[in-house]
Amino acid sequence: MKTNRFRLKSRTIRQILPVLIATSLFLTIVFVASCDQAGSLNPDGSESPASESMPMTSPTSELTTTTTEPATITTTFTTKNDAVTEPPLPVTTTPADELWEQDLSELMNALRPPIVPGNSIPFDARILRTPPRECTVGISTNPVIISNVDQLTVHLSKAQNGWYFNDTDVDNLLDVYNREFFRKNVLIAGAVGLNSGSIQVDIKDVIQTDEHLTVLFNFTFPELGTCDMMSWYYFVEVSANDAAGRTAANSYLPNVESPTLAY
């Protein structure tokens, strides 16, 4: 009888023990959970602000230090994109057109023809646009009188070493100013060099004195001239009788030189 009771108690204990263990584990889990929750609450039971999810932001650093002795010095360091920078210096630009323009009023005064006492004689003229070479940039020459084909050929050969002549123009000159032409006429030839190719060059008059033939020029100026160096070669046709016993007067143009032209 006692044995049966003992066995009954042992069986009961074995049945209750798992329940007790499970209950103990459950209570332990509940206790731990309550402790975690209590750690995130304020003493009054409200939720701590620290538990709120804060948005992640890229850190920026701003450091300001101030020294008051002997003077106030403030140093600011920032990594923000709107950091203070020095304002850019103003940039002055010149329109492209202005780089190629110049005031020609001073040159206009320098090219005014002088008053030459004498007689105006008939003439015809050919003026060729002949860009200068390096040795003749900006210079004019004193004119010479050409009396025959041989002199013209030599003159053109030398002139082409100082100025760029179009081959067609040279051929036309030699064709027109042939031996027949020089039977009754002569040529007054020379170069005009100016600092603007926008000027138009023409012959105004040829004045005859007892000793000289003076060529006077007429220049047409634009309101604003281009800044390109240009030269013109002129051939003035006059009667051999009007030129007899006379030489060509020196040019009154500025920058008159006698360039050394190899030939």
Image (spheres, rainbow, N blue to C red):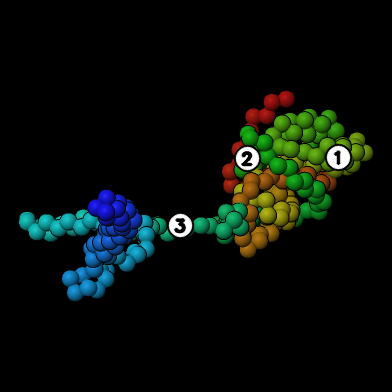
Q: Residue at x 27, y 54 (%)?
A: 1
Residue furthest to the top: 263
Look at discs 3 and 2 and give the one toward the viewer.
3
For mark 3, give the secondary structure: loop
67, 118: nearer the viewer: 67
**Which residue is under mark 1?**
168
Residue 240 lies in quadrant: top right
Give the quadrant of the C terminus.
Answer: top right
Q: Residue at x 78, y 53 (%)?
A: 121
Please, what secondary structure does the residue beneath circle 1 have? helix
**Which residue occupies 85% across, 33% down?**
149
Q: Please rate how many residues cluster around mark 3, counting C-alpha atoms within 10 Å: few if below 14, some from 14 to 19, many from 20.
A: few
- Residue 102 image label: none
Q: Nearer the viewer, residue 173 or 82?
A: 82
Amino acid of disc 1: Thr
Looking at the image, tell me whether mark 3 or mark 1 is earlier in sequence order. Answer: 3
Q: Which residue is mark 3?
A: 91
Q: Mark 2 highlights which residue?
A: 137
Crowding at label 1, few (<14), some or many (≥20) Cα neighbours within 10 Å? few
Q: Vertically, is 160 above or below 115?
A: above
The kind of residue on which mark 3 rests is Val
